Image (cartoon, helix red, strand yellow):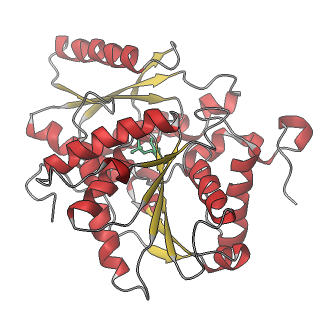
Amino acid sequence: MLTDGFPRVDLTHRPTPLEPMPNLSAHLGGPKLWIKRDDCTGLAMGGNKVRQLEFYVGEALAEGADTLITTGAVQSNHVRLTIAAARKLGLSCEVQLEERVPGRSESYYRSGNAMLNRLMGAKIHRFPAGEDEAGAELAMQRIAEGVRSRGGRPHIISLAQDHRPTGSLGYVDAAEEMMQQAGQMSGSIDAVAVTSGSGSTHAGLLAGLRASGNSIPVFGFCARRDAQAQRTRVLERSAQVAAMIRHPDAIAPADVLTDDRFLKPGYGLLSEAVVEAMRLVAFHEGILLDPTYTGKAMAGLLAMIAEGCFSRTENVVFVHTGGTPALFAYPELTDPPDAAGIPAAA
Ligand SMILES: Cc1ncc(COP(=O)(O)O)c(C=O)c1O
């Protein structure tokens, strides 16, 4: 495997299924749609961050750490899963929750991931400053100093751009796993669609595919930054990952595809198109998407299908990166239109 030799721990139920979505495909009359079920990675309600944490925590243990520290939004799946990984491995954990999403209801602060964090007994710090990646990083340093002053050995898991994209190695593995599964499909994979947040998943998939000689396009749908900023970020990240797995020239700038059409009204905020995409997949396949990441990516993929970007004979894989616990923090998803401006289900 391309990731052999990197320190890691085993946290993931794998391989995750690669399933067809026949009802949705028939309804849309476009390409054959498949779904890579990384919402089913096993640990504490699953999601993409489980694969990434295998490598982050592996690195932490190799350094002799006894306390994991990380940061994320109040409904961050990464935070929930970092706590779960710490609990599974008997490590301490301190997390920081950033007030990135304005105007949220009480459920946002009490339910979903916020509730699960408390259930797992994490020490929680608040970061009220809003969207400020550099500020949140500095605040984590202060949390680490506190741990050190009490005799602990902290390790900061940072998804910021100036840190090595260690977690992307989990998606180099996932790319290899998916290509092995594709060998059992009739036909080949013609395109992959995935959410692009910190860019770790997007960059890892891309590096894994290109390093194994595969030119399948990977469409990254933006969840936090506009398409240009995200493209720059993923290009840098994927080149770094490619170098880490000893394929430094695997990524060309044209490989990085980003689409921000459904980012609006902003990170963690709903739009009608996103709610509609979530409803469509739930109705036709009984598969639940999340409001912050996979709902936006599915809205983007549906738009591409409507524009005729794929033929009927092509196979398109949607990577379900999880995030479903956050559904419970967005009760307005099924509110009547006069309450939230979002239409009720037909
Ligand atoms: C459910 C879910 N999907 C996608 C992403 C984005 O993944 P990445 O940060 O690797 O780009 C996240 C990030 O937190 C997530 O929680």
Which of 9/150 is in front?
Answer: 9
Left/right placement of residue 202 relative to residue 151 reads right
Can you give x and y, in whole percent of width and height, for residue 266 in the image?
62, 32
- Give the residue at the far right of this rendering: 338
Residue located at (55% from left, 24% from top): 100
Q: Could you tell me which quadrant the N terminus lies in?
A: bottom left
Image quarter for ligand 1: top left
Confirm whether residue 86 shows in the render: no
Q: Quadrant of residue 158?
A: top left
Confirm whether residue 301 shows in the render: yes
Q: Quadrant of residue 231?
A: top left
Which of 21/205 is in front?
Answer: 205
Left/right placement of residue 279 relative to residue 19 reads right
Using the image, determine if residue 236 lies above or below residue 259: above
- Give the residue at the far bottom of this rendering: 186
Left/right placement of residue 63 relative to residue 100 reads left
Q: Quadrant of residue 148?
A: top left
Residue located at (21% from left, 67% from top): 212
Left/right placement of residue 251 relative to residue 231 reads left
Can you give x and y, in whole percent of width and height, for residue 27 in the image?
73, 75
Can you give x and y, in whole percent of width and height, for residue 64 in the image?
9, 34
Residue located at (36% from left, 86% from top): 184
Can you give x and y, in whole percent of width and height, for residue 46 in the image?
43, 54
Q: Could you tell me which quadrant the C terminus lies in?
A: bottom right
